[in-house]
Image (cartoon, rainbow, N blue to C red):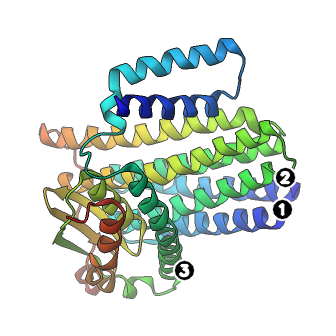
Amino acid sequence: MATKIATFITMLLFWVMLSGMFDAFHFSLGVISCLLVTLFSHELLFYGDKKRSWVLGILGVVLYFPWLFWQIIVANLEVAYIVLHPRMLDMIDPCLVRFNTQLKRPIARVALAQSITLTPGTITVNIDEDQFTVYALTRSAAESLPGEMERRVGKALDSAS
Amino acid sequence: MENLFLISSLVFIVLVALCLVRVIGGPTVLDRILGANVIGTKVTVFLLIIGVLYKNVAMFVDIAIAYALLNFITTLGAAKYFLHRKKAGLQEND
Amino acid sequence: MLWIAGFLIVAGLFFFAVGVLGILRFPDFYTRLHAAGKCDSLAAVLVIAGVALYNLTDYSLANLLVSIKIMAIAVFVFVASPTATHAITKAALVIGVEPWTRKDREQ
């Protein structure tokens, strides 16, 4: 029941944001469609284990995000340096890396994959059970995996065992 | 500030034209999809800037949202299509 | 406020240009993905944030709503861009696009 209410409130906030009209007709249309969506797919948005509270999860994401953004800026400057370098081909050395992750929850794995794609010289190709396949642009970027990022994602989203 | 938006829209046009080189030139099909995806992201942002220039951001935001969604789904659909075509053994030589 | 917005837009344009140059200059498909996947998402978020700030300069409730909508686009791009990159990479690996390596350079 709690997930249904949470989904409904999130959907309604999203509706109000998108429509921007507050008269009775449009608002009631929004309430009806949000109710329908909640009825059909309430287990999609907030799902899974009840062990971890949402407040803690949101706090973790809020703490993780500034660090991620800083890493993204650093990554982009690195890529910009490589792209603008006249002898670019000498600097890149692409390779495939595989490593195993300790993260358990699916959402934490997805967050790690997205973060890897967005940060220095690496793209996540595939997640198979525990194994990540990562395509790295330079040798040093490949060696830095999984490193600090996995620890931080684990702290933010994965229950500490 | 108006001038900045005008200049940035000109820059956007040049960048989209450069992306078209990649879309037309190839070498593989996936390069073309990638180029189209990048153009889509640029156009999403470009629509917002057009909105500012015409002083009607409220309308253009909705168009930009729809365009971003369409762009994402197009890329996913194209990638999935080529995945399945390979599995069916229908890959062309290019 | 205006200066911050202008700075964000110019920085975003710079990263867009770097992304396009990368797509044109890198030797193979996978390395092009690096330029496209990273530079594009950051640049889009920067320019969108700049436009949202500019939109807030004459403050009203309607403008605030529009700005929140603009930031929703930014969040969507931030989530969708890596996912699209990931999907294309996987398709390329399954199809069997040859990666560029150091050996190709030495030939």
| x and y, in percent, of residue A64 in the image | 44, 67
Q: What secondary structure is found at the residue carrying circle 2?
A: loop
Give amino acid for label 3: Leu
Say which residue appears at 33% left-offset and 78% top-offset: A148
The label number, if any, that marks residue A84 in the structure image = 3
Residue for badge 1: C2
Q: Residue furthest top?
A: A25
Q: Categorize mark 2 by other alpha carbons within 10 Å: few (<14), some (14-19), many (20+).
A: few
Q: Chain of mark 1?
A: C
| x and y, in percent, of residue A65 in the image | 48, 64
Q: Quadrant of the N terminus of chain C?
A: bottom right
Say which residue appears at 51% left-offset and 78% top-offset: A74
| x and y, in percent, of residue A114 in the image | 36, 59
Residue B86, by quadrant, is top left
Q: Categorize mark 3 by other alpha carbons within 10 Å: few (<14), some (14-19), many (20+).
A: few
Give amino acid for label 1: Leu
Tell me if label 1 and label 2 are in contact, CB under 8 Å.
Answer: yes
Residue for badge 2: C57
**Residue toward you, C43 or A146:** A146
Q: Chain of mark 2?
A: C
Q: Earlier in the sequence, mark 1 or mark 2?
A: 1
Q: What secondary structure is found at the residue carrying circle 1?
A: helix
**CA gap, disc 3 and disc 2:** 35 Å
